[in-house]
Structure formats: C-alpha cells, structure tokens
Image: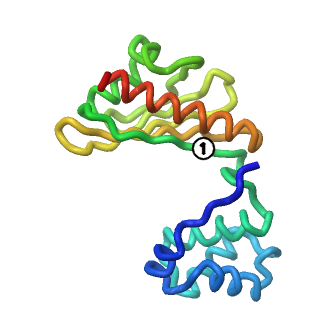
C-alpha cells in the first residue's frame, strides 16, 4: 500500500500559517480519529484554512491516522493522470471522443461515453461496466491543452494503483499521438 504523501511544509505554512505537525495536533486535541471528514473540514475552517486547504488537511490527517487509504473516497477509490499536450484543445477532445482515434492511443480498454460537453469534459463508463472515467479538458493557448483523466469507483487500493499506472501510460500515449 502506498504511503500517504504530504504537500510540502513550505506550501502549507505559506497558505495556512501552520505546519503539518501543528494541524495534526489541533485535530488530535479535538479527537480527530473519532470525527467524520466533514467535522475535520469544519475544524480546519475554524482555524482559518481556505476551502481547498480544508480538504487537503482533512484527507491528509485521515490518511496519516489510518482512517482512509491513499486514493480512497466515499464510494471506492479514485485515481487521476494528466498531461499537457502541444495540440489545440479541440483536437485533443476529438481524439478522446472519437472511437476510431481513441483506438490509436488508448491501449487495452475502451470507454462507453455517457455524456459530454464539447471542449470541457467527457463522462464515460470503463470496459468493466462498473467504474467511471472522466476526462476534463483545459485550453492552454492556441496550440496547447491539458487533459485530466479521473478513474472513479475503483474497488480497492490495489486496483487503484494498477489503474493509476495504466492512466499515466495512456496520457503519455495520447501526448505521443500528437507530438510523435
């Protein structure tokens, strides 16, 4: 099982004015291991953390106290992989949406598209029929875009790690599809 990683001390200190040790001590004093995620978020809010940092603090605490595994969510496990590609967002979006183009870069699997918003996102079901793959697209300029794949509802940490590696390879394949 992967060890939880913390965002750097410099970043959390800069953003919240507290170190990880200070945050964990605050939560421990409040009986954090008996609290829900929502309660830990509320505690971080009370101590001045912004919305994004509230979530980071709550998840990091739960992982480091053995309350949650890496990649674990409310319903299963989620993993993601992203890549910036030297191609317009329109053509990257089409390469994911179009089944013929998708076969050129997506190896060992396919997506059943459930819905999509042009140039923004594609929601799909993975070949297992149980898990979901979301693709989000970001325009980074005339000839540059970013794609983020998120694979959700994975059944366990072992499958999550396997699919994290799989999607890391697929985003490289997609980049090479455009950049050679």
The residue at the point 44 percent across, 80 percent down is 14
Q: Quadrant of residue 46?
A: bottom right
Please say if 135 is above or below 4.
Answer: above
Residue for point 61% across, 78% down? 20
Structural crowding at the residue carrying mark 1, measured as other residues with C-alpha within 10 Å and reported as few (<14), some (14–19) or many (≥20): many
Q: Is residue 164 left or right of residue 2?
A: left
**Which residue is labeled 1 in the image?**
79
**Residue 48 x %, y %:** 51, 85
Q: Nearer the viewer, residue 2 or 93?
A: 2
| Residue 72 against residue 11 in the figure, above or below | above
Q: Position of residue 131 (x, y in %)?
A: 65, 33
**Taking 1 as reference, is 112 above or below it?**
above
Q: Which residue appears farthest toward the right when viewing the image?
A: 34
Q: Nearer the viewer, residue 124 or 2?
A: 2
115 displayed left or right of 38: left
Percent from the top left, x then y, of residue 149?
49, 38
- Snapshot quadrant of residue 67: bottom right
**Residue farthest along the left direction in this orientation:** 142
Instruction: Say which residue appears at 68% left-offset and 40% top-offset.
Output: 160
Quarter containing the C terminus? top left
Secondary-structure class at tag 1: strand
Image-quadrant location for residue 80: top right
């Amino acid at each position: 099982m992967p060890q939880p990683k913390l965002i750097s001390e410099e970043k959390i200190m800069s953003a919240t004015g507290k170190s990880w040790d200070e945050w964990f001590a605050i939560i421990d004093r409040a009986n954090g291991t008996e609290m829900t995620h929502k309660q830990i978020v509320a505690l971080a809010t009370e101590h001045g953390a912004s919305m994004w940092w509230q979530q980071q603090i709550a998840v990091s605490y739960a992982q480091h106290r053995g309350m949650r595994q890496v990649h674990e969510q409310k319903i299963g496990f989620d993993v993601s992989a992203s890549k910036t590609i030297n191609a317009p967002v329109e053509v990257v979006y089409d390469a994911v949406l179009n089944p013929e183009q998708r076969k050129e870069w997506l190896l060992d699997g396919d997506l059943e598209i459930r819905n999509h918003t042009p140039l923004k996102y594609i929601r799909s079901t993975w070949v297992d029929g149980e898990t979901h793959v979301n693709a989000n697209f970001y325009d980074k300029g005339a000839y540059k875009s970013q794609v983020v794949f998120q694979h959700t509802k994975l059944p366990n940490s072992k499958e999550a790690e396997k699919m994290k590696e799989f999607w890391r390879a697929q985003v490289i394949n997609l980049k090479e599809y455009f950049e050679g």
